[in-house]
Amino acid sequence: MDRRDGKRVKDINGMEQLILDIKPNRSEADVFIQDDVDVTNLMKYLDKAKREGRDITIFHAVLTAFAKTIYNRPKLNRFIANRHVYEHNEVTISFVAKVAFTDKAEEIMLIIPVDLHDNIDTISKKIKDKVESIRNEKDISKKGANGALDTLGRLPNIIRVPLIGLFKWMDQRDLLPKSLTEDNLYYSSAMMSNIGSLGSKSIYHNNTNFGTCSSMTTIGVLHEKEVIEDKKKKTIKVIDFGINFDERVADGFYLIRSFDLFKYILNNPELLDDAASKKYDINK
């Protein structure tokens, strides 16, 4: 049976089904990849875009590259619920944005839907429009999950704890009301955190058993790195990434190939101008 947010995947083999029984929780199936990605060409691309009047950031480029990878590698858009495999109805990337740049400023969960024909320019506009809309509001009226979290968090333990237990049971069976899933970053194809903007390297960030999101990516700080190429030393610009996947949605071979494509797109940034759904075969 399909869910409101995804279609049931039925063509899985016996081993894939048994893994769901052996590892029923997402937190038990964490696969973590951490690696430096050469973004020398990407930085040249962003500099050129800036001169052309295109307001595109590293975060915009990374989010676009990840969305394109999902379109090319559809198993990355799957999730596990109640020991069944589902595929999201759309590709969405979520992140947290601060209302203001202060320690005490509120944080708002945002989800960016990436359509088939989106490219880096349209995705960049979607991100900027959403972030600016919350920062320009003098009195922020929280909707969806953002508002529900505030209300739930204020309840006493004796009410809140069993209620959250009920919500987790409902979550697995697609029974939660829209008010708890709307703009909820745990109900997206992938989550991202740009901790590089804080001057930090990428970190391991666990996936959660709640929701339908099967991956979590942390983006580290941009820095220079010396490498040897053709027996000569040179300096390149790199960003380190920490990416968690739920191994139940795809095996390690599939995940490594997906990460290779993600790196390929960032190293060939002109591909970001293509439609998100354009297919690439880098393993010919």
Image (tube, helix red, strand yellow):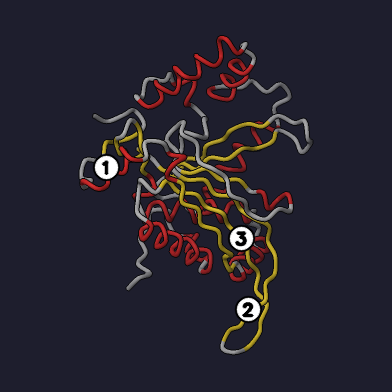
The mark nearer the N terminus, 1 or 3, is 1
Q: Is 76 rendered above or below residue 176?
A: below
Residue 19 point in image, percent of width and height: 31, 44
Work out which residue is located at the far front of the displayed protein and give it.
Answer: 22
Q: Which mark is residue 240?
A: 3
- Give the SS element for disc 1: helix
- Give the SS element for disc 2: strand
Q: Nearer the viewer, mark 1 or mark 3?
A: 1
Q: Which mark is residue 18?
A: 1
Q: CA distance from mark 1 to mark 3?
A: 34 Å
Identify the residue position indicated by label 2 in the image.
Answer: 227
Q: CA distance from mark 3 to mark 2?
A: 15 Å
Q: Residue at x 71, y 53 (%)?
A: 200
Q: Quick check: 115 left or right of 35?
A: left
Q: Specify the quadrant of the image occupied by residue 81.
A: top left
Residue 65 point in image, percent of width and height: 49, 56
Say which quadrant the N terminus sits in: top left
Q: Residue at x 35, y 54 (%)?
A: 251
Q: Nearer the viewer, mark 1 or mark 2?
A: 1
Q: Specify the quadrant of the image occupied by residue 274.
A: bottom left
The mark nearer the N terminus, 3 or 2, is 2
Residue 43 point in image, percent of width and height: 64, 66
Which one is in front, 57 or 8? Answer: 8
